[in-house]
Amino acid sequence: EKAGFDHFMLKEIYEQPKAYRDTMGSRIDATGKKVVLNEIGMTPEQIKAIRNVHIVACGTAYHAGLVGKSVIESLARIPVETDVASEYRYRSPIITPQTLVIVVSQSGETADTLAALREAKRNGARVLAITNVVGSSVAREADDVIVTWAGPEIAVASTKAYTSQLIAFYLFGLYLAQTLGTKDEAYIADVVSALQELPAKVEHILAQSETIKGVAEQVSTHNNLFFIGRGLDYHVVMEGSLKLKEISYIHSEAYAAGELKHGTLALIEEGIPVIALATQGDLFEKTVSNIKEVKARGAHVFGIHEEGEAELAKVVDQVFAIPATLPLLTPALSVVPLQLLSYYASLARGNDVDKPRNLAKSVTVE
Ligand code: M6R
């Protein structure tokens, strides 16, 4: 049932191109220029009445929600807050009938996420669920559901569910933009066409997994490392760091690159690995100057950049290029090398990749 792969996690990483295609599926209209979300019951009037959005989730789904915030704010210009479900419930969030609450859960059974959904409904908000399990508790109780068609995810470490959640956010963000008129047709058509190119670009990254394996083997000999990035890259490195901790048991921290000098830089010492994501063109120079800060303190930097960007190779020790896409869509590509990195680091350490210690696939207790 692992279809020739050594672990479910690797199989699921390789299933991502299909998961992207299936999640987009019939949600892109025949002209390939706009999004159709027949499953959304909200009327255009109800969508126009939305004043704010709360995205609530746990773990990896929370990290997808951080990207979701940028996607919705940039496409639909509605203010969005993203919260960890176990915090959201207890901070008296300001939820009104004009709040759209989006809960994100692969399993649809996470206790804190389900409790947040109920709290949102008690306060009169409309709830949209993004879930991978049709008929799950979250799917049954939400007003609207976008199913991610990633297929069953068996490995405890979430991979294809996360990237399918990103696709769901792109589709929903575009749907809001179409309804609200915040972006014109040509812009929407460009994003839709870039979305459709993602699966082949993921395949291109997967074909270079040996390079990542080499880096992972070096990383696996360390007990501490850092991930840095800015903007969307920061949210992706948060996910990369969680994945590495979860299955390799190597301690790592993800930092917004510009925050380093406010404390963390003190931890950088000779030889410490730093994984730097620098895919966002408008932030590139800023990230490079943060990379120079850690290099000057002896860090060994592994940089990930977009193809065609020659600069990074001059300042870091090793580079890996991902295919170019629109800045908003890079998370759906840049997370893939980080997933492979965790997988191979866990493997090199001889861990049980699919069943990491102390963890369960579905967390149904608070
Ligand atoms: O089923 P859910 O998406 O609600 O699960 C949320 C988290 O428990 C989950 O993403 C967890 O963080 C993963 N094991 C991370 O790889």
Image (cartoon, helix red, strand yellow):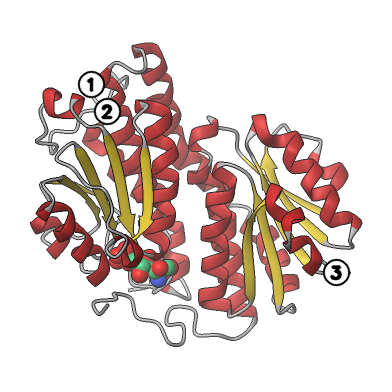
Q: Which mark is residue 269?
A: 3
Residue at disc 3, CB closer than 8 Å to ligand 1: no
Q: The disc labelled 1 sits on which kind of residue?
A: Thr
Q: Are marks 2 and 1 in contact (CB under 8 Å)?
A: yes
Query: Would you call the spot at circle 1 few (<14 residues within 10 Å), some (14-19), or many (20 or more)?
Result: some
Q: Amino acid at mark 3?
A: Glu
Circles 3 and 1: CB atoms closer than 8 Å: no
Q: Which residue is mark 1?
A: 179
Viewer-proximal residue among 293 and 36: 293
Q: Residues within 10 Å of mark 2 (few under 14, many from 20)?
A: many
Relative depth, front residue between 345 and 103: 103
Residue at horizontal 89%, vertical 61%? 297
Report the side of 321 relative to 148 (left or right).
right
Q: Residue at x 72, y 31 (%)?
A: 308
Q: Nearer the viewer, residue 290 or 87?
A: 87
- Tell me how far mark 3 sits from mark 2, CA to CA: 46 Å
Q: Compared with residue 118, is residue 188 higher up or lower down, i.e. above or below?
A: above
| Residue name at image x 27 percent, y 63 percent | 89
According to the picture, the residue beneath numbered tag 2 turns out to be 176
Q: Identify the image quadrant of the N terminus.
A: bottom left
Q: Can residue 287 be seen?
A: yes
| Number of numbered callouts drawn | 3
Tag 1's secondary structure? helix
